[in-house]
Image (spheres, rainbow, N blue to C red):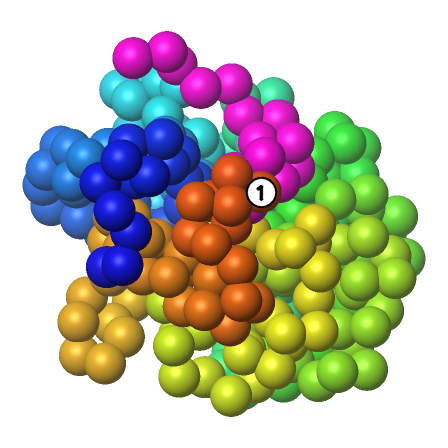
Amino acid sequence: MNVNSAEREYMKLVDTHAHLEEFKDIHAIVERARKVGVVGIVGVGVGYFSNLKTLELSEVYSGFIFPALGVHPTEVEKEGEKVFDLIEERAKDCVAIGEVGLDYWAKTSRERQNMVLERLLTIAARRNKPVSLHTRGAWEETYNLVEQFKIKKVIFHWFTGPTETLKKILDRGYYISASPAAEYSKRLRENLKLTPLDNILLETDSPVKYKEVEAEPAHVLKTLKYVAELKGIKEAALAEKTTENATNFFELRFKQL
Ligand SMILES: [Zn+2]
């Protein structure tokens, strides 16, 4: 990547969306991330066991892995009451509620997706927690719900929705995040072009595959590169800005190494 080593030494990055419980060798993943300047990772949960594992990892790597707890719209039919109890009980220990949202391209019941999202937004509103949102094919519906629940901080992760919804997101002061798909996804690139740097966060959605390559948090460096090219700014400047955004958004307290 076209960053000289002196610049990179000062670069600090945050991966704001990764599914860490899916990795077998988490220690190696953390080491590789730290080597490229990652100072924090927000681990997002998708269901009961995934939330538990994410919490456990955040205790082992405290001040580096920060937990978000949620129920992914594709998982809503597998989850029962205990996931809500867990999120309610551990909300105080997490930096956000997520991954939550609506996905009308998924096969799961829309009614159940809405019910689950509304219950989790109720918790987020009551606990004053930011929300990390997944939305596909239900962009307006998802936006309307977070607005209705008066959620103050929302990140529309890897946002590929339409420009009309993006405008509302930005007017409201909400955020979108860029994944490594910023290299080739037309919708994501278009949305990133229209979004001010103040409203952009970086992520990987690890271990999602991009062009056949499984992502890990160290690849947030790829996201950085593609977004810097797209916005016509230096990687170091973008790293500084997006890390400041992530730190404020999630109120991250990094452990000094
Ligand atoms: Zn995700």
- Is residue 71 visible in the rendered image? The answer is no
Name which residue lies at 36% across and 18% down.
Answer: 62
Q: What amino acid is found at the position of numbered circle 1 in the picture? A: Lys
Q: Residue at x 44, y 30 (%)?
A: 66
Asked which quadrant contains residue 171, the reply is bottom right
122 vs 252, nearest the viewer: 252
Residue 248: in magenta span: yes
Above or below, 145 against 154 in this view is below
Foreground of the two, 244 or 63? 244
The percent position of residue 2, horizontal first and vertical second, equals 27, 59
Left or right, residue 91 beside residue 148: left
Residue at point 85%, 69% (across, down)? 168
Residue on which the image places disc 1: 241
List x then y, in percent, for residue 188.
54, 78
Residue extending farthest to the top is: 256
Residue numbers of the magenta segment: 242-257
Q: Residues within 10 Å of mark 1 (few under 14, many from 20)?
A: some
Q: x, y percentage for residue 69?
A: 51, 41
Q: Is residue 136 magenta?
A: no
Quarter of the figure with the C terminus = top left
State whether residue 222 is above or below residue 44: below
Indicate whether 44 appears above or below 184: above
Residue at 16 percent across and 40 percent down: it is: 32
